[in-house]
Image: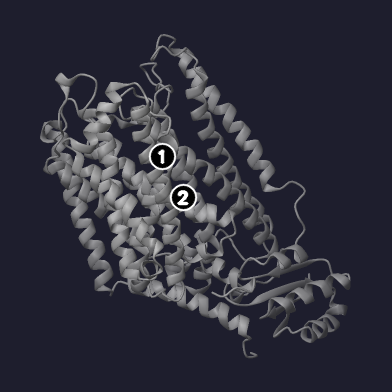
């Protein structure tokens, strides 16, 4: 066979290097399987605590009048927020032809799918009778009852189920050409598995035509869905007349917050991930810096939303709303408020400094702080508003108890468990997209 | 059916080979690439009469109607559930569900049509496939009568094919 040309060598090298990343997940790898096993252990404990909560009832939690939505609903909104950035980064940046997205898109999309899986647990965990969660599904039944589609909770169920399905399709379609490569390089049961996942892909010009057309269309659909789904999540709150919730700014405010938390989680996962997977050649400092730039922009939008909330509370003539916002700043939940401001509005400003943007460990620390800030923001919005409603006689406080802490921490382990399991068994960077970039004349 | 499978390792070479084959009247050909290449796709495949977008649009319209039908019909099954002073058939909340079903149906139709169309765009019956095409090599399968095989082989080699197989 003739010696390979430069292009062929580069394409071959991309296949080899990215597929090498899968080597660390082989059965002999103690680090990988140790971490996966630890995550399984932690979420198994959380599952046992959930079973205990079902058995004893919600008396074991800190949920009581007037705060009936606490850690679980906060976790739901937090994880949905994380879920929204992955596909958004991938889809919107694809539509804008931002080629730098390619190396981080697969990790971001995988994060999305797993985060939706995590978020979807919490409405069920929050149910006293969790086994009746199926009542949300519209199906003919002997009681002749259908779900109430005027309820924002039904919108939520429909939107999140759809978001999961469409994100999964978007993620899977992008993987098909890579599965074909794995099929052609594997033997035995792995070959059989990858052959079925590759859906008969052979890389003909006609197949690439349909692939690109479908992928672009899905990216557009996903983008519309991302914006709508987190708006719908915000309407769970905004449709209620609770002071601090009943605001028309909630939809864009939540969408911006979701993007901020999602981008931060992409950094949190990518920075150690690129070392462990050995894909530093692909996910470079430039990619991390670009994500940091996006974070600055989105953080400014989120800060504007914070200011707007307070401005309208001051401008409006509603004493209840004004009281709720004053309580946020100097009441029982004031530490959460100031933590939110520092983490979400001040820390991202550090990214104006090139020295911070170009330092992986500083980005990593900042991304964790922003995630802490986003969690505290969600908790603040949900809990402080319920704790400080119209009647001063019924004001109260919410203190989570150990079952809530365990289940919420367990959800983090559940998230990592599935993320590691999936990203360890599919190419962590889209091989076909990287090759397409080389064919277009770009650097890898 | 006879033909030649030529293997290339540069996109410019396979592109030149496609154009040359078409100029020579050899129109029954299949080009393979390890990644999307707009120029090669345009040169070696014809756009469909009805694109995937048309099916997605139709499915989206169906999803919109299905969402509205589901919400309105189920509400009318038990016409006593008045919530928050809203009319029984309240379009704003129902439109949220209808929008979601629109996107869902459009996305499923997009992927369904991709699978169907891509299976139709597989190599022609009996056309060979080389595993290198998913890695780093380009391929061109040209159907031609046995009498033209030597000439076509020479042309492909001249245009930079690293291997030519008569099938």
Q: Residue furthest top?
A: B80
Residue at image location 43% in from the left, 46% down from the top = A301
Residue at image location 41% in from the left, 68% down from the top = A354
Residue B111 placement, left or right of B43: left
For residue A191, say whether it is visible.
yes
Give the Cα distance between marks 2 and 1.
26 Å
Q: Which mark is residue A253?
A: 1
Chain letter, disc 2 residue: A
Q: Quadrant of the C terminus of chain B?
A: bottom right
Of badges 2 and 1, the one in the foreground is: 1
Badge 2 local density, few (<14 within 10 Å), some, or many (20+)? Answer: some
- Work out whether A389 lies above or below B55: above
Chain letter, disc 1 residue: A
Residue A113 placement, left or right of A1: left
Q: Secondary structure at mark 1?
A: helix
Q: Position of residue A241 (x, y in %)?
A: 33, 22
For residue A378, what is the image quadrant? Answer: top left
For residue A291, what is the image quadrant? Answer: bottom left
- Work out whether A34 lies above or below A349: below
In depth, the one of B150 and A316 nearer the eye is A316
Residue at image location 28% in from the left, 51% down from the top = A342
Q: Position of residue A156 (x, y in %)?
A: 40, 33
Q: Secondary structure at mark 2?
A: helix
- Work out whether A207 lies above or below A361: above
Which residue position holds label 2? Answer: A168
Disc 2 + disc 1, Cβ < 8 Å: no
Q: Which mark is residue A271?
A: none
């Amino acid at each position: 066979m003739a010696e390979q040309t430069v292009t062929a060598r580069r394409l071959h090298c991309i296949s080899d290097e990215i597929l090498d990343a899968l080597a660390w997940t082989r059965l002999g790898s103690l680090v990988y399987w140790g971490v996966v096993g630890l995550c399984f252990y932690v979420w198994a404990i959380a599952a046992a605590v959930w079973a205990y909560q079902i058995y004893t009832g919600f008396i074991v939690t800190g949920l009581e009048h007037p705060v009936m939505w606490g850690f679980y609903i906060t976790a739901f909104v937090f994880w949905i927020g994380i879920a929204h950035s992955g596909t958004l980064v991938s889809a919107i940046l694809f539509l804008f032809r931002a080629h730098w997205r390619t190396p981080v898109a697969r990790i971001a999309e995988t994060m999305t799918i797993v985060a939706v899986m995590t978020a979807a647990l919490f409405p069920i965990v929050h149910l006293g009778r969790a086994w009746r969660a199926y009542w949300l599904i519209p199906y003919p039944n002997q009681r002749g009852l259908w779900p109430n589609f005027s309820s924002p909770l039904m919108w939520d169920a429909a939107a999140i189920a759809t978001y999961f399905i469409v994100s999964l399709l978007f993620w899977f379609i992008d993987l098909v050409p890579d599965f074909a490569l794995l099929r052609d390089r594997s033997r035995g049961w792995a070959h059989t598995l990858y052959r079925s996942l590759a859906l008969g892909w052979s890389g003909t010009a006609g197949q690439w035509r349909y692939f690109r057309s479908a992928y672009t269309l899905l990216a557009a659909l996903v983008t519309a869905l991302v914006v709508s789904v987190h708006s719908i999540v915000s309407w769970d709150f905004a449709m209620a007349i609770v002071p601090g919730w009943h605001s028309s700014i909630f939809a864009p405010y939540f969408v911006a917050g979701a993007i901020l938390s999602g981008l931060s989680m992409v950094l949190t996962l990518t920075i150690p991930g690129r070392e462990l997977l050995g894909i530093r050649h692909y996910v470079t400092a430039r990619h991390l810096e670009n994500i940091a730039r996006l974070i600055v922009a989105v953080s400014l939008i989120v800060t504007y939303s914070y200011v707007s909330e307070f401005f309208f509370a001051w401008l409006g003539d509603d004493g209840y709303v004004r009281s709720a916002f004053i309580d946020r700043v100097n009441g029982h939940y004031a530490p959460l408020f100031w933590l939110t401001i520092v983490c979400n509005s001040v820390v991202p400003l550090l990214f104006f400094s090139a020295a911070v943007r170009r330092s992986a460990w500083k980005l990593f620390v900042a991304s964790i702080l922003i995630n802490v800030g986003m969690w505290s923001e969600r908790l603040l919005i949900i809990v402080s508003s319920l704790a400080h409603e119209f009647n001063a006689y019924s004001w109260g406080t919410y203190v989570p108890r150990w079952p809530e802490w365990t289940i919420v921490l367990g959800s983090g382990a559940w998230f990592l468990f599935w993320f590691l399991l999936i990203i360890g068994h599919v190419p962590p960077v889209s091989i076909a997209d990287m090759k397409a970039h080389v064919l277009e004349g770009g650097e890898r | 059916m006879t033909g030649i499978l030529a293997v290339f390792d540069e996109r410019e070479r396979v592109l030149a080979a496609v154009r040359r084959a078409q100029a020579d009247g050899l129109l029954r050909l299949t080009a393979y690439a390890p990644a999307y290449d707009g120029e090669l796709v345009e040169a070696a495949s014809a756009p469909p009469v009805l694109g995937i977008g048309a099916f997605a649009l139709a499915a989206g319209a169906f999803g919109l109607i299905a969402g509205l039908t589901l919400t309105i019909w189920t509400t009318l099954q038990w016409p006593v559930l008045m919530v928050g002073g809203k009319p029984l058939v309240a379009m704003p909340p129902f439109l949220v569900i209808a929008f979601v079903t629109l996107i869902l149906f459009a996305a499923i139709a997009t992927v369904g049509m991709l699978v169907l169309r891509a299976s139709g765009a597989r190599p022609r019956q009996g056309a060979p496939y080389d595993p290198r095409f998913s890695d780093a090599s380009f391929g061109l399968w040209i159907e031609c009568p046995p009498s033209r095989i030597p000439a076509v082989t020479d042309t492909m080699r001249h245009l930079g094919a690293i291997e030519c197989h008569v099938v």
